[in-house]
Amino acid sequence: MEFEKVKIDAHGKLSVPHQVVIPFIIGDGIGPDIWKASVRVFDAAIAKTYQGNRQINWLEVLAGEKAYNETGEWLPTKTLEVFKEYLVGIKGPLTTPIGGGIRSLNVALRKELDLYVCQRPTKWYEGVPSPVKHPERVDMVVFRENTEDIYSGIEFAAGTSEAKQLQDFLKNTLEVQYNFNNSTGLGLKLVSEEGTKRLVRSSIDFALAERRKSVTIVHKGNIMKFTEGAFKNWAYQVAEQEYGDQVYTWNQWEQTKAKAGVEVANAEQSKALADGKLLIKDIIADNFLQQILLAPQEFDVIATLNLNGDYISDALAAMVGGIGIAPGANINYKTGHAIFEATHGTAPRFADTDSMNPSSVILSGVMMLDYLGWNEAADAIVNAVAATIKQKTVTVDFYNLMTDASLLKTSEFADKIIEKL
Ligand code: NAD
């Protein structure tokens, strides 16, 4: 049997062979336990769904502690080359090396492959313990910009000569009025038109393809006008200029309101939505964090900047059961490169205990199967995970918060899911 690579054509369409090679990083800490459980679920779902007509050949590549112990490098060049060549991969959590060199292996991978979208769906599964009254009202997909913002890493520590030089430049050349002193550290917040538009485009394409109701731009443009405010403006621009009749924006509503009054604007919006147009709206980030608790049903696809997206995806994850069940993907829709990963870390204290929840990796795999177009296998896994949780046969994180649940090990939880496929 020939195993082949995922490829992408000139129109950005993926072609996925039925016998495909997918590279994976096993991960550090709890990584090996949850990966071993998850991969059995993927293989069983694919075998059952496609009866041997499709198959993944898993190709292990090294990163993190395992790579360091075997090669002396945290992120070997070979690993990057394999991800570049095979386009789509999946990874377990990685330790962040302490000391100099690489700041974070995850950030390094995102940068190398220019994975500009961090996509994180948040949906509640029946029975999952939640701190909110109506977790079933939460069904959002966050598109977090993954390459810009204050995550660019351009920072100068207080007291250094670089910080002093930058302060002098700001004071003397740009005539910035600010009371700098020796104890002021500086960091740059970078937001570009190109970076914003490619992120927002991906979120609108996704919303249209999935027949979602709205895309909400989350920003702090009231305070940071030329970064977050510009993000909002470019987002509306891309929606109106590139999607025309397929969308209706709050920007259009504002313009109609100014010209013809609020009632006409409301009628225009109602008609647009009745006609099946996608609503593009915006909200200030602090209000958004309030509204997801008060009225989560008002939000669907979210397009936001890097830092906001970081906070928002953890807040949303908590509402539907926490990081044990929070999948994610880092994607470049132009090159096709994508790395799927759980959003939690290595939880080193629990390494080799066969006790942690593998759902985040399993659901990251579901996202990967959907990305590959193997939706039937993805759906089968989602249904089996949902049925397993509904029966209250769960790992310790959920067990501790449920009544009358049965406690399973990581491997046993995977067995239960496989039984239900
Ligand atoms: P963590 O996410 O590893 O763990 C925090 C707590 O969350 C754990 O103590 C555990 O109680 C719980 N938890 C995590 N995963 C779970 C699971 N699958 N099931 C049930 N409960 C789970 O965060 P941390 O302790 O701050 O970070 C540990 C290491 O992981 C650090 O080196 C950090 O840099 C790294 N990290 C890596 C990634 C990644 O690779 N994507 C993400 C975050 C942190």
Image: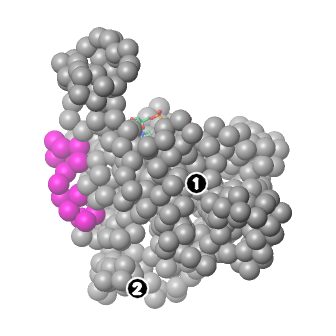
* Residue at mark 1: 217
Label 2 CA crowd tier, 10 Å (few <14, some 14–19, many 20+):
some
Q: As shown in the figure, which amino acid type bears the numbered disc 2?
A: His
Label 1 CA crowd tier, 10 Å (few <14, some 14–19, many 20+):
many
* Residue at mark 2: 18
Is 125 situated above or below 7?
above
Q: As shown in the figure, which amino acid type bears the numbered disc 1?
A: Ile
Q: Quadrant of the C terminus?
A: bottom right
Total marks in image: 2
Residue 260 at least partly seen: yes
Residue 178 shown left or right of residue 253 in the figure: left
Q: Position of residue 315 (x, y in %)?
A: 62, 41
Identity of the residue furthest to the front in this view:
259
> Bounds of the magenta span?
70-84
Circle number at residue 385: none
Q: What is the distance, in whole Å, between disc 1 and disc 2 at their CAs? A: 37 Å
Instruction: Report if residue 221 lies within the magenta region.
Output: no
Compare residues 130 and 250 and report the one nearer the observer.
250
Q: Quadrant of the N terminus?
A: bottom left
Compare residues 174 and 105 and report the one nearer the observer.
174
